[in-house]
Image: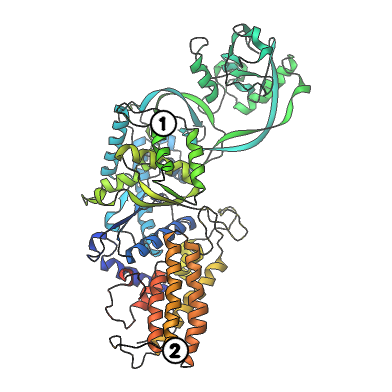
Amino acid sequence: MELSSSYNAKEVEDKIYQLWEKSGFFDPNKLPKNHKKPFTIIMPPPNANGSLHIGHALFITLEDIMIRYQRMKGKKTLWLPGADHAGFETQVVYDKKLEKEGRNRFQIPPAELYKEILEFTLTNKKVMEHQLKKLGASCDWSREKFTLDENVIKIVYETFEKLKNDGLVYKGKRIVNWCTKHQTSLSDVEIKYEERIDPLYFVKYGPLEVATVRLETIFGDVAVAVNPKDKRYKDLIGKEIPLPLTNKKIIVIADEAVDIEFGTGVVKVTPAHDQVDFDIWQRHINEIPGPIQVINKYGKMNELAGQYNGMKAKEARDLIAKEMIEKGLIDPAKIQHEYKHNVALCYKCQNIIEPLILDNQWFVKMTEKPKSGGLSLRDSAVKAVKSKKIAFYPARMEKVFLHWMKNLRDWNISRQITWGIPIPGDESGQVFDTWFSSGQWPFASLKASENKNDFKEFYPTDVMETGWDILFFWVSRMVMLGNYATGKIPFKNVYLHGLVRDKEKQKMSKSKGNVIDPLGVIDLYGADALRMALIVGNTPGSDPVISEEKIKGYRNFATKIWNASRFVLMNLEGYSPTEKIKLESKDKKILKDFQKQAKEITKEIDNFRFYTASEKIYHYFWHTFCDKIIEDYKKKQVSQHLLITLLFEQLKILHPFMPFITEEIYQQLPIKNKKECIMIEPWIIA
C-alpha cells in the first residue's frame, strides 16, 4: 500500500470530485439511514454574469466546511446551490459588453435584449457551476435552482399578491433615486454616499436668505420652510416672498424638520428633487403647490429652467451662481467654498443620483401593519433578532442590523430595466428590484423543489453565510420577507465574512492589478491550499488578507500531509486492521492528548471559529504528529497501530478544510469498517 512519491493536486482533484458525485452523498436523501436530523444551508446564489472571483471562493469554502463537518456528525445535510439572474447588476455588466460592441441597449427591442441577456447568463451559469466544483463544493446539484426558474417566479408572484392583499404594496407617482446613466430607479440601500466639497450659496429670497448647494433646482421651489420654534421668522410664516430669477411668489411654511442651526435656518422646498422636501410637501399638501420637475431623466435642465434648458445640472449651477451674483441675489463674500456634505451616488457607476418623481412606481410599506394582522415587515424582523431567534457572527452585527432597521423607509421595488422578473399588472414593462426576488430565496428555493417535502423538512435553514456588505441589501430583506411569507425565520444563524484584500490590505480590483484568480491558483497550488489560505486567520466580519505566498505556504502543508501519510503507509508491514491491539501507556497518553485537541477543534467549529480550528489542526499535524510522533516511531518509541490511528483521525478532522487530499489518502488506508468516502465517516474521535 503506497502513495505516489509526490502529491499532484491537478491529477487528483477532478477524479475525487467524480467519486463524490458518483457516491450520491451530496443528496441528503441518499445519505446513510443514521443521518436523520436535517442541517441546511441555502447557497447565496452567485450572480450568473461572470466568472467566480476570490470572494466567491471564500464563501464556498466556509459553507463547504460547515456542510462537510455536519455531514460527518451524522446530520442529514442539504446544501442547495443556485444562481442569481441579478437584475440591475447583470444589466450593468451587459451594458459594458454592448458598449465594447458599439451597441446601445436603448436601441435594442426589449424582447430581443432579454433573450440576449438570458443566453449570456445561462452560459455563465454553466461555467460558474464547473468552477464551484473545482473549489470542492459538496452541494446537491440535483436540487440546483435559478432565480428565473418558473416555479421560483411563481412563488415571488404569490408573495407580491399577498403583500398587495394586505395593503402593503402601493403604486403611484413618487420620488425615487434615479441613476441618469443606467436610466433606472434604485432603492435606498443601493445608494452610496460620498463626502464631497462644493460651494454653499446664501441666496436672497426677498426678506429671507436660504443656504443651498443646489442652485439649479430653484426653478422647482414651491415654498421655503422655517422651524415653528424659530423666533426669527415667526412673523413671516404664511407670507409670500419672491422666488429668485423668476416672477413667481412662494409661501413661507413652518415645519419641524427644519434644522434651526443649519445655515440661516431657512430651507427651500423642492419636492420634485429631494426626498426630505417631498416629505415636507406631503405634510403641507393643502398649503403649497405640487412638485415641479426642472431636471429630466438624463440629468439635464428642462424648459422650466428658461435659458438654462438643455444644460447639465452642474453646468447650469455654475452659470446660475454667476447670474445671481451679478443681480445681487448672492453676496460672493458669504459663499462657503469648502462646504463638506454627503452626496448620493449610484453604487455601480458612481454618478450622482438625481431624485425624480416618476409615475407608476411600486413600493412596499416597511413600517405599516398588514391588514390581516400581525407586525409590520420591519417590526417582525426586529422582534426575531431581539428575541435571539437569529444569531449573528460576529455578534456586533446585530447592533448594526437593528440600527439600520430604525430608519427604514418604504422600499421602491420597480426597476426600469429589461432584465428581471416582470411586475404583474404593470403596463410600463417594469421589473422587480432583484433584492425583492432574492429576498425570498431561502423559502422560494425549497418550496420550488421537485422534492415535495423539502420545505417542510429543511426550513427554517440553519446558516445564512454571506458578506457583511450585503447585510442591508439582502439579509434584512430575507428576514422580513421570510417571516412574512412563511411565518417563520428563514435561518437561525447569520455568518458574515469580510471582503478579501491583498497583502497590502488593499481592496482587490482589476485596475490595481492585484486580483487573485481562484481558478488560476487552484491550477498552480490545488484547491485545498487555497481553501486553507482563505480560512486561517480569517475572523468573521473582518476583511481577510490573501496573497499568493500564503496559498503557496498551504500547498507546502498539503505536501507535508502527503509525505507523512506516505511514510505511515510504507511502514505498515505486518499490520492488520482487524487484529486486537493492546496499547502501551505512552501510546494511550498520546491518543488521549489528541482526543483533547480534537474536542477543542470541535468546539471551535461549533462556535463558527473556523479560523482557530484550522490553525489548531495545522499545528498539531505539522508540529506534533510529524515533528514528534513520526520521529518517535522511527526510534521505535511508539507503535504502528498508534501511527495509523492518529493519521486516520486527523484526516477526518482535516477533511472539511482540505477535502481533496484527505479523500485521496483515505481511499488507501487499511482500516476496519471503511466507508465508501471519508465524507460520511463519523466525526466522533475513536
Pick the quarter of the image with the N terminus.
Answer: bottom left
Q: Is residue 327 found left or right of 462 in the rendered image? A: right
Q: At label 2, which amino acid type do we have? A: Val
Mark 2 crowdedness (10 Å alpha carbons): few <14, some 14-19, many ≥20: some
Specify which label sits upstream in the sequence, 1 or 2: 1
Dot 2 falls on a residue whose secondary structure is loop
88 vs 497: above or below? above
Mark 1, residue position: 366
Numbered tag placed on residue 20 in the rendering: none
**Residue drawn at (39%, 70%), measured in percent from left and top?**
655
Q: Is residue 401 found left or right of 442 in the rendered image? A: right
**Residue drawn at (43%, 32%), measured in percent from left and top?**
411
Q: Residue furthest left?
A: 452
Mark 2, residue position: 638
458 vs 340: above or below? below
Residue 349 in view of the camera: yes
Q: Residue furthest right?
A: 333
Report the front residue among 268 and 622: 622
Residue 37 image offset from top left, x and y in percent: 28, 58
Q: At label 1, which amino acid type do we have? A: Met
Residue 549 image offset from top left, x and y in percent: 57, 68
Which is in the foreground here, disc 1 or disc 2? 2
Report the front residue among 191 and 394: 394
**Residue drawn at (55%, 62%), measured in percent from left and top?**
546
Pick the quarter of the image with the C terminus.
Answer: bottom left
Q: Which colouring convention does the figure follow?
A: rainbow
How many discs appear? Answer: 2
Residue 23 image offset from top left, x and y in percent: 26, 68
Tell me the quarter of the picture where residue 666 sits.
bottom left
Mark 1 crowdedness (10 Å alpha carbons): few <14, some 14-19, many ≥20: some
Dot 1 falls on a residue whose secondary structure is loop
Report the front residue among 583 and 620: 583
